[in-house]
Image: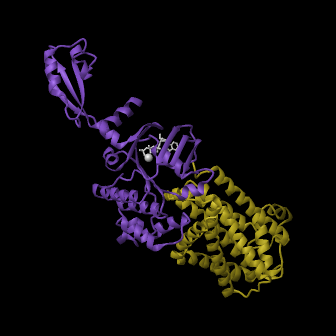
Amino acid sequence: MNLNAVKTIYVHEMRRFWRTITQSLVSPVLSTSLYFVVFGAAIGSRIDQVEGVGYGAFIVPGLIMLSVMTQATSNASFGIYFPKFTGTIYELLSAPVSFLEIVAGYVGAAATKALFIGIIILLTAFAFIDIQIAHPLAMIALLMLTCISFSLLGFIIGIWAGNFEQLQLIPLLVITPLVFLGGSFYSISMLPPVWQTITLFNPVVYLISGFRWSFFGVADVSIGLSLLAITAFTAACLGFIWWIFRTGWRIRQ
Amino acid sequence: MTAIVSVKNLRKAYAGGFEALKSINLDIQEGEILALLGPNGAGKTTLISTICGITTPTSGTVTVGGHDTQTDYRAARGMIGLVPQEISLEPFETVFSTVRFSRGLFGKPRDDAKIDEILAQLSLADKRDNKVITLSGGMKRRVLIAKALAHEPRVLFLDEPSAGVDVELRKDMWEVVARLKASGVTIILTTHYIEEAEAIADRVGIINKGQILLIQDKAELMAQMGKKQLRIDLAVATPDIPAALAKYELQRAPDGRSLTYTYDTNGPRTGITTLLNDLQSAGLQMTDLQTQQSSLEDIFVGMVKEEA
Ligand SMILES: Nc1ncnc2c1ncn2[C@@H]1O[C@H](COP(=O)(O)OP(=O)(O)OP(=O)(O)O)[C@@H](O)[C@H]1O
Ligand SMILES: [Mg+2]
């Protein structure tokens, strides 16, 4: 195991994050605050409670998930796309590193950044509303798992992408709709029965539901099912990445 | 001497089916400088990329220090440093941090003093904290070399190190190469410049259309180049070479209008005076004389043309 290489990639990627720390944090904090003002204060004041939780508090887990998933995906996809773009990937390919080490370095860094942003948003939320976290350990664990699995997804996108447009396409076209339709701002039970069934095919539902459970102890689907879904998703991404490196798909001729 | 890099029956066909390498066999001796000469598209970069792990071979094997580059890639790649043909660098990193990254990636423990030493060797010390994007092209190439040396490789591949580099920097680079050789590093470089191969290589290989046409000691090649040719144009075409001139091993042009004599400038006597006397005795009348020296360039151009 070339641990030095993992550490080097990780530190290198994190340095870029710290260099642009203001940029990295200002936009998620600002957009979260806007959500709180619009949904929490303006609209929320007309909605009583959802599942026994005040609406302002109810949307916090969904908001965190929204940011964390988008950030993890775009960080990781950019992280591995950039060396492809500048040509410096030659170094990764000619270095004595295995695919697991490359993934650990890039995905680890992307997941850390996303986790960091998730925590900042949570802290911002505390400034607006009073929330109690029912299962703090489960909350952190679920947050970390989400960061990792969506960073893995981002890594795949970064390897697949042939240009910057494609790089932004998936987060825009797939992740944002899935998160919005995944119960970030409402409970699945508020939907008509047909839509409730359709929604169950959206993997993000399980993540948001599980995450919300860790806050309020209430969930749309059982926590066991949520854990199963997120594990399966992570495993699928890892399997795909393993295949990429075995075949050299889009990276090695 | 033992071969540090051994290439056996290496073939590489790209996805489109194009065969860029056709069964290459090549042993590179430890401590030597090998120059690979070849025209554009000959397969030089493909050969290097395949040895270094950037492209996968279609068939054949490569070992570096006895380690197979496919099955034992960690040990094999750890010994290699690569300076690619294209300048590929992260634009917003500083020189120092990009070189340090290379060292870490190859699994070596952090050693800032070592990196400063490498930068100094390449006259990059004063650019240490500059962003890569602010450097000139030649400077960037030096950064690439520094990155390749950061993990103290035993074998260094330089893919066209002098492309886009001025005479001054080229001389500097040759000095660096000489120093590396003195410290026991094996160096393989590709080039279009014959004088570069002449100046620094121990052996010269000529590659064209995915095949190695010749690989020879530079000293031997130089000896061949010491040969000069004298062309004698005749007033009247001769149907054959007179028996009296047999000892000169002359070559007759197809039309019989000229004879060519090859001699060694390094020899004690060239034999020209006696030849000219004997020509006259044989009754051949000369109209003109021309001498010509063959060079590595002639050999190279000749071989590559023959192939085409
Ligand atoms: N990725 C690729 N896909 C298909 N063909 C390729 C690829 N890379 C190189 N080739 C082809 O393989 C042949 C050898 O290319 P290579 O880059 O090895 O040549 P070279 O000797 O390094 O040339 P140059 O002196 O121009 O650098 C060329 O005909 C080139 O078009
Ligand atoms: Mg080339």
In the displayed structure, A31 sits above or below A176; it is below
Q: Nearer the viewer, residue A38 or B98?
A: B98
In the displayed structure, A92 sits above or below A21; it is above
Image check: A140 left or right of A25? right
Residue A243, image x, y percentages:
68, 53
Q: Tell me what residue is drawn at x 74 percent, y 83 percent.
A: A45
Residue B89, image x, y percentages:
46, 61
Image-quadrant location for residue B92? bottom left
Residue A170, image x, y percentages:
64, 59
Image-quadrant location for residue A37? bottom right
**Outermost residue toward the top in this view:** B239
Q: Nearer the viewer, residue B233 or A195?
A: B233
Report which colour depicts chain B: purple
The number of numbered badges drawn on the structure is 0
Q: Colour scheme of this structure image?
A: by chain
In the displayed structure, B68 sits above or below A186; it is above
Image-quadrant location for residue A18? bottom right
Q: Nearer the viewer, residue B85 or B52?
A: B52
Q: Nearer the viewer, residue B226 or A166?
A: B226
Residue B38 seen by the camera: no
Residue B76 seen by the camera: yes
Which quarter of the rendered picture does the C terminus of chain B lie within? top left
Image check: A149 left or right of B290? right
Q: Tell me what residue is drawn at x 46 percent, y 51 percent.
A: B30
Report which colour depicts chain A: yellow
Image check: B107 left or right of A221? left
Residue A229, image x, y percentages:
79, 65
Image check: B84 left or right of A228? left
